[in-house]
């Protein structure tokens, strides 16, 4: 049974007979996650996981509760049940360096329907928790719309809530300042950029706001709209702060734009994720491309060189320096990819609505050395005998065309419904949450076996049985 969970045994959903989905057999020699623990506490879809420290994480979802877990043992540590409606955002608030108590706080936003307001939208509420004691610290219920995203600006020691407007709060949950009504659809994503600025995704627009802290000449905080970026053609679904000089946004129609954080200009743009190459089944592939959910960019992550992009059912690697896609799996999953994370050793993990979690390895394609051939068809690729002036640009084009591949090395099948997201805990394994109300803690089987053996020997040594048996 465990072998089936870890290995094969899953038929692709929909169009299975012609699906180009890459598969892997039961013998997954490079997949370390051969053991699992199923964690049960939620009664509805588990949408969010947030890491608290090296061994603890919190989960939250549509049942309105927050649960704190031990990532090493799978033990349930605490449960918070202050919300009466689904949780829409969760984030941790780090403790101050000057604070004697080092308790970490959790901020959760909820669509709690406690008051009816004039806009015919239920007011949400924010609850702040002490994740070491499970004690509710404070609650505010003054929002005019559902809060969809939260952000912490640690340097200014404030946090932001994004709904139909953008609000700035301090640790005591005092409202410092807010914008006017931005949009009925609300802010879908929020990130911090340099110079006390934040970027808010509102529909098709990216709005740059600057926070102004109190000075001797001003009595309070202020938030100013600086610029609107209108380059996207459809709603923006994902935002990623890459480094101090750039950030990335992805839209519903598959647009990836790299922005300059200082000048707020476009550095690069990629709109050809699903441009099908000519093949026998090209007509069918073009038809698939016309589905909006096949090109939506649901999630972004990055390392120092690349941005890893979840595009529809596919997984793409975009090189920031070369400004192009260097590797892709157009059909990485049977359904939309919801979350992707880059791991050490050039590995990538993705999860999907199809209920699977897949492990990929980014490999460089070996360039085959080709002998000179007579002029003809291959001459268009620079392989033929041509004059030296013509060979230079061709050689440069060949060097720029060096690309990589994403090879499937593991397929984790344990959930029976959409896998919403996951956390990577290095030695403690991988944590996934799902619409099946479950959380699964995937463990490195070889490491766990070694730990059990070590524990057994330590116990025998304590009891004196080890020397007796010798």
Image: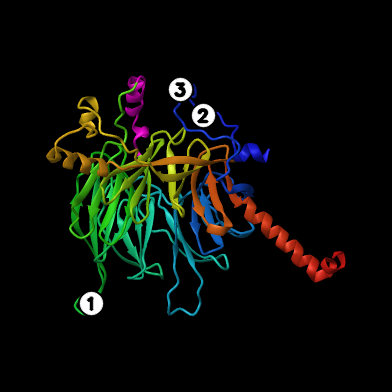
Instruction: Quote the CA–CA distance across marks 1 and 3.
Output: 65 Å
**Which quadrant holds the C terminus?**
bottom right
The span shown in magenta is 280-296
The x and y percentages for residue 261 are 23, 58
**What secondary structure predominates along the stretch shown in magenta?**
helix
Q: Compare marks 3 and 2 and give the one earlier in the sequence.
A: 2
The x and y percentages for residue 339 are 44, 45
Q: From this viewpoint, is residue 361 visible?
A: yes
Instruction: Quote the CA–CA distance across marks 1 and 2.
Output: 60 Å
Residue at the extreme left:
389
**Which of 150 and 247 lies nearest the eye of the viewer?**
247
- Say which of marks 1 and 3 sits in front: 3
Compared across the picture, whether 311 is left or right of 354 comes to left
Which secondary structure lies at badge 1? Answer: loop
Which secondary structure lies at badge 2? Answer: loop
Instruction: Quote the CA–CA distance across marks 3 and 2.
Output: 10 Å
Q: Quadrant of residue 227?
A: bottom left
């Amino acid at each position: 049974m465990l072998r089936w969970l870890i290995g094969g045994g899953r038929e692709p959903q929909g169009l299975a007979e012609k699906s180009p989905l890459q598969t892997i057999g039961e013998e997954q020699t490079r997949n370390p996650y051969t053991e699992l623990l199923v964690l049960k506490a939620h009664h509805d879809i588990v949408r969010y996981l947030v890491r608290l420290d090296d061994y603890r994480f919190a989960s939250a979802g549509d049942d309105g509760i927050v649960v704190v877990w031990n990532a090493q043992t799978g033990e349930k540590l605490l449960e918070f049940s202050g919300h009466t409606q689904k949780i829409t955002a969760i984030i941790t608030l780090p403790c101050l360096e000057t604070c004697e108590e080092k308790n970490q706080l959790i901020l959760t936003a909820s669509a709690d329907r406690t008051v009816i307001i004039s806009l015919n939208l239920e007011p949400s509420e924010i609850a702040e928790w002490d994740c070491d004691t499970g004690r509710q610290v404070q609650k505010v219920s003054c929002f005019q719309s559902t809060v969809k995203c939260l952000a912490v600006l640690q340097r200014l020691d404030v946090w932001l809530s994004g709904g139909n407007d953008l609000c700035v709060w301090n640790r005591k949950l005092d409202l410092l300042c807010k914008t006017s009504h931005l949009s009925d659809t609300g802010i879908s994503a929020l990130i911090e950029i340099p110079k006390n600025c934040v970027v808010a995704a509102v529909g098709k627009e990216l709005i740059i706001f600057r926070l102004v802290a109190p000075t001797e000449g001003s009595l309070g905080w202020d938030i100013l709209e600086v610029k609107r970026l209108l380059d996207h053609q459809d709603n923006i679904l994902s935002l990623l702060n890459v480094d101090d000089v750039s950030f990335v946004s992805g839209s519903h129609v598959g647009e990836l734009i790299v922005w300059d954080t200082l000048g707020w200009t476009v550095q690069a743009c990629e709109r050809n994720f699903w441009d099908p190459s000519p093949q026998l089944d090209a007509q069918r592939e073009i038809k698939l491309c016309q589905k909006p959910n096949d090109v939506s960019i649901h999630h972004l992550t990055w390392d120092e060189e690349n941005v890893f992009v979840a595009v529809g059912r596919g997984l793409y690697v975009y090189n920031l320096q070369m400004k192009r896609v260097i590797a892709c799996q157009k059909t990485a999953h049977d359904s939309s990819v919801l979350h992707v994370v880059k791991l050490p050793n050039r590995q990538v993990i993705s999860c999907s609505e199809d209920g699977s979690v897949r492990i990929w390895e980014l490999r460089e394609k070996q360039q085959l050395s080709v002998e000179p051939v007579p002029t003809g068809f291959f001459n268009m690729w620079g392989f033929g005998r041509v004059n030296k002036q013509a060979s230079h640009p061709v050689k440069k084009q060949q060097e720029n065309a060096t690309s990589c591949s994403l090879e499937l090395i593991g397929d984790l099948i344990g959930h029976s419904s959409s896998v919403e997201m996951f956390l990577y805990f290095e030695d403690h394994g991988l944590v996934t949450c799902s619409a099946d109300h479950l959380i699964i803690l995937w463990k490195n089987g070889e490491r766990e076996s070694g730990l059990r053996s070590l524990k057994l020997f330590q116990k025998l040594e304590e009891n004196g049985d080890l020397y007796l048996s010798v």
